[in-house]
Image (cartoon, coloured by chain):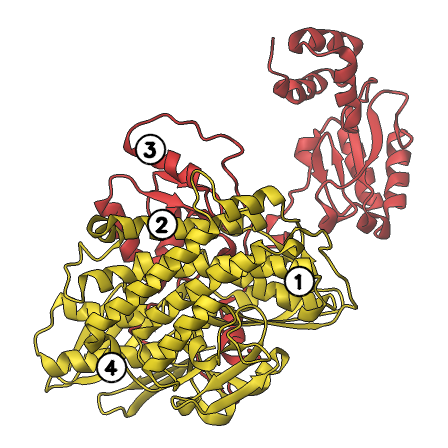
Amino acid sequence: MKKVVIEPVTRVEGHGKVTIHLNDEGQVDDAFFHIVEFRGFDRFIQGHPYWEADTLVQRLCGICPVSHHLAASKAIDQLVGIDPGDLSPTAEKLRRLLHYAQMFQSHALHFFYLAAPDLLFGLDAPAEQRNVVGVATADRETARKGILMRIFGQEVIQAIAGRKIHGVAAVPGGVHKTFHPHERDRFLKGSDDLPNIDTMIEWSKEMVDYIKDYHEKNHDWLDSFAYYPSGHMGLVTDEGALELYDGKLRAVDAEGKITLPDIENDRYADYFREGVEKWIYMKFPYIKSLGRDKGWNRVGPLARLNVADKITTPLAQKEFEVFKMLTEGKPNNATMHSHWARLIEVLHCAELMKELLDDETILGNDLIRKGTPRNEGIGIIEAPRGTLTHHYQVDDNGKIEKCNLIVSTTHNNEPMNRAVRWVANKIFEENQTITEPMLNQIEVAIRAYDPCLSCATHAMGQMPLHVELYDSSNQLIDERFKH
Amino acid sequence: MENRENLLNTIWEYQMAHGHLDQHFFEEASKRFGISEVEIEGVASFYHFFHQKPQGKHVIYVNNSIVSEIKGYDRIIEAFERETGARLGSTDPTGTFSLYSTSCIGLSDHEPAALIDFHPFTHLTGMKVKKIVQEIKAGSTSADLADEVPSNQRLRPASDKAIFFREHVPGKSLSRLFDVTPDAFIGMLKEFRKKCKVLVSAGECAIWGGVPAMRNTVPLEECLEEAYLNSVTTDEGEDKVPYQEDLPKLLDKVYGNHELVKIDHHIPGCPPSADVIWKSVANILWDEDQPLLCDEVKFD
């Protein structure tokens, strides 16, 4: 019995580790992706007034604080009696602009800084080269565009939320600040240090072309690497189009059969359960009716394109059609195609940002609406990494009594573990000696899901309440309880 | 000119030596500190322990807390008035005793309580007051007669619950830490320390734990139960929380980096602004001297 450990897994947000258990013949017994950090937001937020929540919980993450801020705000709106449709048009559009900017910059960060080194240099490249500096050395122009795209998204966020990370834009029932024409013009027309939105659309288009070209040359491994069938989940509009801020939850299985029929956000708890495993601080959400073994779903760019029937913006819709043709309209189950899907979303977000920047409504001053307070609020949005759920219950004084957060990466827990097992099996089937590039392949598979481990383990760990000890034949040999 | 921060100490010293603050004191202090007499008088009159009229040789303050009221404050005042001959708020004709009431003196768990010449006297009764006053008249000092206030009667939460009252033994929290922690986590930080010439904590979480340190106010069991056993979407009948050898155990609480290893610089902010990070790096790496301006360094 031998154990291979990869630690830490690099170029992902947060801390993770992989263990691969080999049997005496050197074959893979099992492989695990351990998420080794844990924090505990859902408990320590209790007792705090609801209006603190969206500021506190965005500290779950430094990469997509905006997503947490907005998911929490959507839930908190309901606590002051405002459903998503009741927001003023200005407030909703400013929140959407903020959200799209966030999606744009986060995807750009992932593609250029985290994923590009794998694609540019291949799986066998030396570790020194596999980073953003390596990208910049090899392809200066691409790296420059990547950095500027990220800056563009960040600047939009700063204009709306006050700063690039952990800003505050949404308040219960709306947004707290108007958007100034000066601020808008900078993004529409560009400035000395910032290209305009049209350039962003153009560059996004270039990136999609790049990945299409890359796929042409490398489809051998892109199509097969970490391929496995799974369910997919994401938000869609009433018309079934890709939706990122507010929509209905839809899931399909690997063949495209609907497993979650466009449900309203406030019914999520009727449909979902979360499993717990001993070897990971992250939980395993699944659709209740399908059970733990079959009910798990991928979320994120690939899953969103798999559940959506169309995309509302023209350029992205065109790319969507090309992407769908690969699998003849069926869900795409190839892990590495996540990168492709992600870039189509980058293009979509750039187009959406332009639509909103051209819309005079975002300059309006009708910012906040009020309703009759309620005791429960549920906010679901599509964060860059997938479906993000925030659920709060408060007492009559507005003190949080219960909080449930299902973070995007949590849904991808099972998928990432499948991917790791897939790669581990392949590595040890082909070769009995283990090399560093082989182990990198495992990271490549995980990275396709752009996991945010810090976010996902907002839920707690350690303190052995119930300890089970298994021997190599998986017999339970000891069991302890600690209270 | 003397630093005005020493004014309170100076007032205390003078009153201890002379019994009260006279016009001479205000004139002298005004010159010493370069502060107007009226401002010094303002300070002196703000605190009821300072007196501007001559006081008796012994000054008595009886606590008038609500607990004291319930436990016989009125009777104790009566007893002091009877034994000393001083009326509440004044000095007796012989100039021996002054009698005042005072708000909280930190002895509410020992009421009725009083300070005599600032020494504590607790659990007062009529008899006890009589005896104390007689002995002081006979020449005993209030220091000798004073009660000892047993500190073990103060509320001290169990040490694993205490935040403010936890006994501080340098290094103790760390030794406990190494008991509960596999090297997996702290090991990395120690490795950094070993290999790095300069180690910097960037951001509030690195510095003191930040928002996640809110967990330190909640017992770990409760957090676990909430996350894995009691959440809205918990499986029915779920009874386990993650625990396995490949999973590093969590620390007992959230620590700042500098509590575990020596940290050379701290860059505050959640997050620190890009400018502050850049300037800090420039200052450290290239020995530059770029000032970090107040409005650049945000702590939120």
User: The chain coloured red carries which letter?
Assistant: B
State which mark lies toward you, 4 or 2. 2
User: What is the spatial separation of the Cα atoms under label 4 and label 3, in whole angstroms?
Assistant: 45 Å
Q: Are marks 4 and 3 on the same chain?
A: no
Task: Classify A260 as above or below B33.
Answer: below
Pointer 4 chain? A
The crowd level at tag 3 (other Cα within 10 Å; few <14, some 14-19, many 20+) is: some
Residue indicated by mark 2: A147
Task: Classify B209 as above or below A220.
Answer: above
Pointer 2 chain? A
Q: Is A303 in front, or is B69?
A: A303
The crowd level at tag 1 (other Cα within 10 Å; few <14, some 14-19, many 20+) is: many
> What residue is rendered at 77% in x and 62% in y?
A370
Residue indicated by mark 4: A422
Whether residue A184 can be seen here: yes
> What residue is rendered at 40% in x and 56% in y?
A202
Task: Classify B112 as above or below B44.
Answer: below
* Left or right, residue A34 beside residue B233: left
Precedes in sequence: disc 2 or disc 1? 1
User: The chain coloured yellow carries which letter?
Assistant: A
Residue A17 in the image: x percent, y percent?
A: 29, 68
At label 1, which amino acid type do we have? Tyr
Q: Is A348 in front, or is B220?
A: A348
Q: Which mark is residue A216?
A: none
Label 2 close to label 1 by CB (< 8 Å): no
